Structure formats: structure tokens, C-alpha cells
Image (tube, rainbow, N blue to C red):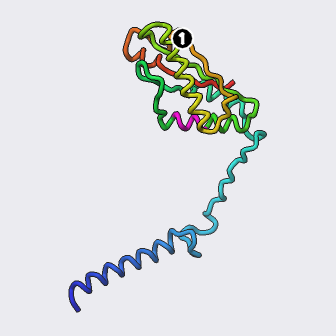
Amino acid sequence: MSKKFLYLASILLTIIVGAVLFWYYCCDCADNSIVPDEQIAEPIVPLTDSSTSIDWLAIRDQLNSNPLTVYYETYKTESVLGQEDVIKVDEIIDYLKNNPDGSLLVNGHADITGPRTLNIKLSQERADFVKSYLVRNGIDGDKVVSSSKGPDEPAADNGTPEGRAKNRRAVVFIN
């Protein structure tokens, strides 16, 4: 036999043996298992999504203690939400699905860069951007109120670039 044939045959044999061993020890469809029956844990039963088993007030308080906050560049009214923000949006959607009387308040904010009238307009457009994002992701628009705070409620010192960056934001609260 040629060396090439033996080489290919050994590779094929290795693949077959590996597949059989994987199936025997790891695959859920195999009859045998390396874990004895007495060591197999009971499956975890997920909680139902009924409102009676979940403390929705605690979830609302938790979401409001660390609210969805979207940050903006100077003079910008659109932003990209990060992965953590997307997770918070999903949690807010879940809350509102299970609490039909719930509603949201989106407050837009600005730093002190530029004229006050422009900052009030920018902060309203920032709040409206977040509202439209929430509506596009399944939240009823009638449940979301957007408002402008302008530069009046800074989260940080407007005297530094970092502080101004923290002040250009829209914050979502659950009512």
C-alpha cells in the first residue's frame, strides 16, 4: 500500500473513532452516559412569566435606580445604543408587557455649549429620538412621554469636557 493511502486511512479512522466517542460520552441522544443516574441533577424549572410570581414593583425600582441613559455627541440628536442599553430596553419592554398601566418618561438633557434655546431644542430632539427607538422596538407610543430639561439638570460639571459629555443625554424612567 502507498503511504498516501495509509495516511488518509488513518485520518479517516481517527475521525470515525472521535465521532463515536463523542456520541457515546457527550451526545444527549446516546443511551449510555458517563454520569451515573443517581448523580444526574433534576432539571431547573423556569419561573413562569405570570405577574403573580414576579415582584414587578421591585423590577421597576431597579430599572429606575439605574435607568436607561443614552449619551450624545455635541449638537447631535441621534446616538447608537450599546449592548447594555439594548438589554435595558428589553427589560423595559418586558415590564410594560406585564404591566399594562405602566408608562415611560424620557427626559432629554443638554450641556451648556451654545445658546439656551438651542439646548432646549436639542434635548427635546434627544428625548424624541429615544422615544422613537422604543416605539420601533415594540412599545406603544401612547405609553411614552418625552420632555426637554435643556441644560437645567446637569449630571456632572459643565466646566470639563467629560462633564459636558455626561450632560448630553436622554434618560428613561418608568412611571
Q: Which residue is mark 1?
A: 153
Give the answer, above or below, for where 137 lies relative to 21.
above
| Corner quadrant of residue 6 | bottom left
| Corner quadrant of residue 74 | top left
Dominant SS type (magenta): helix
Please report the residue visible at 53 percent of the width from the left and 21 percent of the height from the top: 125
Residue 109 rendering spot, x and y as whole percentages: 52, 16
> Number of numbered discs present?
1
Quadrant location, the C terminus: top right
Please report the residue visible at 73 percent of the width from the left and 38 percent of the height from the top: 98
Pick whichever, 171 or 67, lies toward us: 171
Residue 140 rendering spot, x and y as whole percentages: 68, 34
Give the answer, above or below, for where 59 lies relative to 35.
above
Position of 64 with respect to 81 (left or right) is right
- Verify whether residue 15 appears in magenta: no
- Verify whether residue 87 appears in magenta: yes
What is the secondary structure assignment of the residue under circle 1? loop
Pick whichever, 38 or 28, lies toward us: 28
Q: Which residues are magenta?
A: 85-90
Q: Name, please, the residue furthest toward the bottom.
A: 1
Pick whichever, 143 or 36, lies toward us: 143
Position of 6 with respect to 113 (left or right) is left
Please report the residue visible at 56 percent of the width from the left and 67 percent of the height from the top: 35
* Local crowd size for mark 1, using a 10 Å CA cut-off: few (<14), some (14–19), many (≥20): few
Residue 86 rendering spot, x and y as whole percentages: 53, 37
Pick whichever, 52 or 159, lies toward us: 159
Please report the residue visible at 65 percent of the width from the left and 23 percent of the height from the top: 145
- Amino acid type shown at disc 1: Glu
